[in-house]
Image (spheres, rainbow, N blue to C red):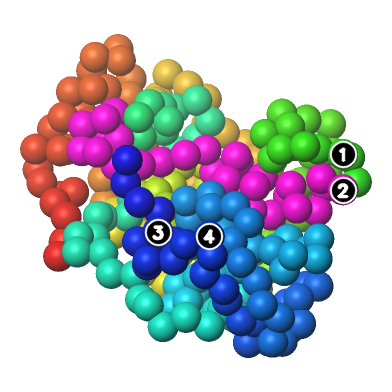
Amino acid sequence: MSKTPFEQAGYTKDTKFKLLMDYNSYKKGDIVTLHRDDGSDCPMFTDGKGNYHYVYLPNMRPTGDQRMEVYVEEATKIKFPIMKKKVGIFGYARHGKDSVAEMLARQIDYQFCSSSLFVCEKAVYPFLAPKYGYRTFTDCFEDRVNHRAEWKELITFYNKEDKARLAKELLVENDIYVGMRCKDELQACIEQGIFDIIIWVTNPRKPVESVASCTIRYEDFEWDVIIPNQFSLRYLQDQVDLLVREEIFDETF
Protein backbone atom coordinates (compact mmCIF):
# COMPACT_ATOMS: atom_id res chain seq x y z
CA MET A 1 0.00 0.00 0.00
CA SER A 2 1.41 3.39 -0.97
CA LYS A 3 2.15 5.92 1.73
CA THR A 4 0.06 9.04 2.22
CA PRO A 5 1.65 12.50 1.82
CA PHE A 6 1.73 12.75 5.63
CA GLU A 7 3.65 9.49 5.89
CA GLN A 8 5.93 10.26 2.93
CA ALA A 9 7.03 13.44 4.70
CA GLY A 10 8.19 11.33 7.64
CA TYR A 11 5.52 12.58 10.06
CA THR A 12 3.95 10.32 12.69
CA LYS A 13 0.90 10.56 14.95
CA ASP A 14 3.23 12.02 17.59
CA THR A 15 4.53 14.83 15.36
CA LYS A 16 3.49 18.23 16.71
CA PHE A 17 2.69 21.22 14.53
CA LYS A 18 2.52 24.90 15.40
CA LEU A 19 -0.11 27.21 13.93
CA LEU A 20 1.42 30.26 12.24
CA MET A 21 -1.82 32.28 12.30
CA ASP A 22 -5.41 32.11 13.50
CA TYR A 23 -7.54 29.56 11.64
CA ASN A 24 -11.14 28.74 12.55
CA SER A 25 -11.08 27.96 16.30
CA TYR A 26 -7.29 27.54 16.28
CA LYS A 27 -5.16 30.47 17.39
CA LYS A 28 -1.69 31.47 16.29
CA GLY A 29 0.82 29.49 18.30
CA ASP A 30 -1.54 26.57 19.08
CA ILE A 31 0.03 23.13 18.96
CA VAL A 32 -1.89 20.47 17.03
CA THR A 33 -1.42 16.82 16.11
CA LEU A 34 -2.90 14.56 13.46
CA HIS A 35 -6.44 13.39 14.15
CA ARG A 36 -7.22 11.56 10.90
CA ASP A 37 -5.05 10.92 7.85
CA ASP A 38 -7.44 10.90 4.86
CA GLY A 39 -4.64 10.35 2.36
CA SER A 40 -4.57 13.96 1.14
CA ASP A 41 -2.14 16.79 1.82
CA CYS A 42 -4.85 18.45 3.92
CA PRO A 43 -5.67 15.97 6.70
CA MET A 44 -7.61 16.64 9.89
CA PHE A 45 -5.77 17.92 12.98
CA THR A 46 -6.79 18.35 16.61
CA ASP A 47 -5.61 20.62 19.38
CA GLY A 48 -6.66 18.10 22.02
CA LYS A 49 -9.42 20.43 23.22
CA GLY A 50 -12.24 19.13 21.06
CA ASN A 51 -11.39 21.27 18.00
CA TYR A 52 -10.86 19.50 14.66
CA HIS A 53 -9.93 21.19 11.38
CA TYR A 54 -8.40 20.29 8.02
CA VAL A 55 -5.02 22.04 7.64
CA TYR A 56 -2.54 21.81 4.78
CA LEU A 57 0.78 20.11 5.41
CA PRO A 58 3.91 22.28 5.18
CA ASN A 59 4.79 23.45 1.67
CA MET A 60 1.66 21.89 0.18
CA ARG A 61 -0.74 24.85 -0.11
CA PRO A 62 -2.38 24.99 -3.57
CA THR A 63 -1.18 28.00 -5.53
CA GLY A 64 -3.56 30.94 -5.34
CA ASP A 65 -5.59 29.70 -2.41
CA GLN A 66 -4.84 32.51 0.01
CA ARG A 67 -7.34 31.42 2.65
CA MET A 68 -5.53 28.15 3.21
CA GLU A 69 -2.02 29.13 4.19
CA VAL A 70 0.39 26.54 5.46
CA TYR A 71 -0.24 26.87 9.17
CA VAL A 72 1.98 24.13 10.47
CA GLU A 73 5.64 24.48 11.26
CA GLU A 74 7.72 21.63 9.89
CA ALA A 75 10.57 21.80 7.39
CA THR A 76 10.36 18.47 5.59
CA LYS A 77 9.20 18.74 2.00
CA ILE A 78 7.37 15.95 0.25
CA LYS A 79 9.24 14.86 -2.84
CA PHE A 80 7.63 12.79 -5.57
CA PRO A 81 10.16 11.22 -7.94
CA ILE A 82 7.48 10.72 -10.60
CA MET A 83 4.67 13.10 -11.46
CA LYS A 84 1.69 11.61 -13.24
CA LYS A 85 -0.23 13.70 -15.75
CA LYS A 86 -3.32 15.37 -14.31
CA VAL A 87 -6.37 14.59 -16.40
CA GLY A 88 -9.77 16.25 -16.56
CA ILE A 89 -12.61 14.28 -18.16
CA PHE A 90 -15.67 16.24 -19.23
CA GLY A 91 -18.91 15.72 -21.10
CA TYR A 92 -22.65 15.83 -20.67
CA ALA A 93 -24.58 13.63 -18.24
CA ARG A 94 -24.57 9.91 -19.06
CA HIS A 95 -22.20 10.31 -22.02
CA GLY A 96 -19.58 7.94 -20.52
CA LYS A 97 -17.18 10.09 -18.49
CA ASP A 98 -16.98 7.73 -15.51
CA SER A 99 -16.54 4.71 -17.80
CA VAL A 100 -13.57 6.34 -19.51
CA ALA A 101 -12.06 7.28 -16.14
CA GLU A 102 -12.44 3.72 -14.85
CA MET A 103 -10.80 2.30 -17.99
CA LEU A 104 -7.88 4.69 -17.74
CA ALA A 105 -7.46 4.03 -14.03
CA ARG A 106 -7.22 0.28 -14.65
CA GLN A 107 -5.00 0.52 -17.69
CA ILE A 108 -2.40 3.07 -16.65
CA ASP A 109 -2.70 2.83 -12.85
CA TYR A 110 -4.26 6.26 -12.35
CA GLN A 111 -6.39 7.18 -9.36
CA PHE A 112 -9.75 8.93 -9.39
CA CYS A 113 -12.70 9.37 -7.05
CA SER A 114 -16.17 10.87 -7.05
CA SER A 115 -15.80 14.64 -6.94
CA SER A 116 -19.13 14.80 -5.07
CA LEU A 117 -17.85 12.45 -2.38
CA PHE A 118 -14.59 14.37 -2.17
CA VAL A 119 -16.24 17.77 -1.74
CA CYS A 120 -18.61 16.25 0.80
CA GLU A 121 -15.72 15.30 3.04
CA LYS A 122 -13.78 18.53 2.53
CA ALA A 123 -16.43 21.24 2.37
CA VAL A 124 -19.87 19.98 3.34
CA TYR A 125 -19.55 17.40 6.12
CA PRO A 126 -17.59 19.64 8.57
CA PHE A 127 -20.45 22.16 8.51
CA LEU A 128 -23.51 19.90 8.31
CA ALA A 129 -22.36 17.14 10.69
CA PRO A 130 -23.11 19.14 13.88
CA LYS A 131 -26.42 20.32 12.46
CA TYR A 132 -27.79 16.95 11.36
CA GLY A 133 -25.83 14.58 13.58
CA TYR A 134 -23.90 12.76 10.84
CA ARG A 135 -21.39 10.29 12.26
CA THR A 136 -19.35 10.01 9.04
CA PHE A 137 -19.02 11.99 5.82
CA THR A 138 -20.54 8.97 4.04
CA ASP A 139 -23.74 9.50 6.03
CA CYS A 140 -23.71 13.12 4.89
CA PHE A 141 -23.13 12.10 1.26
CA GLU A 142 -25.99 9.60 1.24
CA ASP A 143 -28.36 12.22 2.67
CA ARG A 144 -27.44 14.88 0.10
CA VAL A 145 -30.75 14.62 -1.77
CA ASN A 146 -32.49 16.11 1.27
CA HIS A 147 -30.20 19.13 1.54
CA ARG A 148 -29.25 20.11 -2.01
CA ALA A 149 -29.64 23.84 -1.38
CA GLU A 150 -27.20 23.74 1.54
CA TRP A 151 -24.76 21.63 -0.47
CA LYS A 152 -24.80 24.12 -3.33
CA GLU A 153 -24.29 27.04 -0.96
CA LEU A 154 -21.36 25.38 0.83
CA ILE A 155 -19.64 24.31 -2.39
CA THR A 156 -20.04 27.79 -3.85
CA PHE A 157 -18.50 29.24 -0.71
CA TYR A 158 -15.69 26.66 -0.82
CA ASN A 159 -14.68 27.82 -4.32
CA LYS A 160 -15.47 31.50 -3.78
CA GLU A 161 -11.94 32.87 -3.61
CA ASP A 162 -10.44 30.39 -6.06
CA LYS A 163 -12.72 28.62 -8.52
CA ALA A 164 -10.01 26.00 -9.12
CA ARG A 165 -9.68 25.15 -5.44
CA LEU A 166 -11.66 21.91 -5.46
CA ALA A 167 -9.85 20.62 -8.53
CA LYS A 168 -6.44 21.39 -7.04
CA GLU A 169 -7.23 19.65 -3.79
CA LEU A 170 -8.80 16.60 -5.44
CA LEU A 171 -5.80 16.18 -7.76
CA VAL A 172 -3.36 16.07 -4.86
CA GLU A 173 -4.40 12.49 -4.15
CA ASN A 174 -5.96 11.62 -7.51
CA ASP A 175 -4.84 11.76 -11.12
CA ILE A 176 -8.25 12.12 -12.79
CA TYR A 177 -10.98 14.67 -12.13
CA VAL A 178 -14.48 13.69 -13.27
CA GLY A 179 -17.64 15.59 -12.45
CA MET A 180 -16.91 19.28 -12.96
CA ARG A 181 -20.01 21.06 -14.27
CA CYS A 182 -19.17 24.75 -14.03
CA LYS A 183 -17.60 26.60 -16.97
CA ASP A 184 -15.96 29.18 -14.72
CA GLU A 185 -14.26 26.43 -12.71
CA LEU A 186 -12.83 24.79 -15.83
CA GLN A 187 -11.67 28.15 -17.18
CA ALA A 188 -9.89 28.86 -13.89
CA CYS A 189 -8.22 25.44 -14.00
CA ILE A 190 -7.00 26.04 -17.56
CA GLU A 191 -5.66 29.49 -16.69
CA GLN A 192 -3.80 28.09 -13.67
CA GLY A 193 -2.45 25.07 -15.55
CA ILE A 194 -4.16 22.54 -13.30
CA PHE A 195 -4.77 19.94 -16.01
CA ASP A 196 -2.15 18.46 -18.31
CA ILE A 197 -4.82 16.86 -20.48
CA ILE A 198 -8.51 17.68 -20.90
CA ILE A 199 -10.75 15.06 -22.50
CA TRP A 200 -14.26 15.44 -23.88
CA VAL A 201 -16.44 12.30 -23.99
CA THR A 202 -19.40 12.46 -26.35
CA ASN A 203 -22.29 10.10 -27.04
CA PRO A 204 -24.50 11.33 -29.90
CA ARG A 205 -27.17 8.81 -28.88
CA LYS A 206 -27.68 10.67 -25.61
CA PRO A 207 -29.27 14.13 -25.24
CA VAL A 208 -27.17 17.25 -24.72
CA GLU A 209 -27.38 18.25 -21.08
CA SER A 210 -29.17 21.47 -20.13
CA VAL A 211 -27.12 24.56 -19.33
CA ALA A 212 -29.06 24.70 -16.07
CA SER A 213 -27.13 21.68 -14.78
CA CYS A 214 -23.89 21.91 -16.80
CA THR A 215 -22.41 25.16 -18.11
CA ILE A 216 -19.37 23.42 -19.63
CA ARG A 217 -20.14 23.16 -23.35
CA TYR A 218 -18.25 21.29 -26.03
CA GLU A 219 -17.94 24.33 -28.30
CA ASP A 220 -16.47 26.62 -25.63
CA PHE A 221 -13.10 24.88 -25.15
CA GLU A 222 -10.25 23.40 -27.15
CA TRP A 223 -10.06 19.78 -26.02
CA ASP A 224 -6.82 17.80 -26.12
CA VAL A 225 -8.75 14.60 -26.81
CA ILE A 226 -12.29 13.84 -27.96
CA ILE A 227 -13.51 10.29 -27.27
CA PRO A 228 -16.60 9.08 -29.16
CA ASN A 229 -18.92 6.74 -27.28
CA GLN A 230 -21.73 5.95 -29.70
CA PHE A 231 -21.51 2.17 -29.84
CA SER A 232 -20.73 -0.63 -27.38
CA LEU A 233 -18.65 -0.65 -24.21
CA ARG A 234 -16.10 -2.67 -26.17
CA TYR A 235 -15.91 0.12 -28.73
CA LEU A 236 -15.32 2.65 -25.95
CA GLN A 237 -12.56 0.47 -24.51
CA ASP A 238 -10.94 0.36 -27.96
CA GLN A 239 -10.94 4.17 -28.09
CA VAL A 240 -9.23 4.31 -24.70
CA ASP A 241 -6.71 1.68 -25.81
CA LEU A 242 -5.83 3.78 -28.85
CA LEU A 243 -5.40 6.83 -26.66
CA VAL A 244 -3.07 5.01 -24.27
CA ARG A 245 -0.95 3.73 -27.16
CA GLU A 246 -0.38 7.33 -28.26
CA GLU A 247 1.65 7.69 -25.03
CA ILE A 248 0.15 11.05 -24.07
CA PHE A 249 -0.07 9.80 -20.47
CA ASP A 250 3.64 9.07 -20.18
CA GLU A 251 4.77 10.20 -16.74
CA THR A 252 7.13 13.11 -16.31
CA PHE A 253 10.16 13.15 -14.03
Dot 4 or dot 2: first in sequence order is: 4
**Figure check: 12 above or below 122:** below
The residue that disc 2 covers is 130
Front position in the image: 193 or 25: 25
Q: Residue at x 43, y 47 (%)?
A: 177
Q: Say which of marks 4 and 2 sits in front.
A: 4
Which residue is denoted by mark 4 in the rendering? 13
Looking at the image, is mark 3 or mark 1 nearer the viewer?
3
Q: Is residue 89 left or right of residue 54?
A: left
Q: Residue furthest front?
A: 14
Amino acid on which the number 2 mark rests in the picture: Pro
Instruction: Characterize the magenta stretch by its predominant secondary structure.
Output: helix
The kind of residue on which mark 1 rests is Gly
Residue ID for mark 1: 133
The residue depicted at 42 percent of the width and 30 percent of the height is 98
Q: Quadrant of the C terminus?
A: bottom left
* Residue 165 x %, y %: 55, 64
Residue 7, numbered circle: 3
The Cα atoms of the two marked residues, 3 and 1, are separated by: 31 Å
Going from the N terminus, do you reach mark 1 or mark 4 first? 4
Q: Which residues are magenta?
A: 103-130
Q: Are marks 3 and 4 in contact (CB under 8 Å)?
A: no
Which residue occupies the extreme right position in the image? Answer: 131
Can you tell which of label 3 and label 2 is closer to the viewer?
A: 3
Q: Is residue 61 visible?
A: yes
Badge 2 density bin: few <14, some 14–19, many ≥20, Cα 10 Å: few
Q: Is residue 218 magenta?
A: no
- Determine whether, in the image, residue 77 is placed left or right of residue 252: right
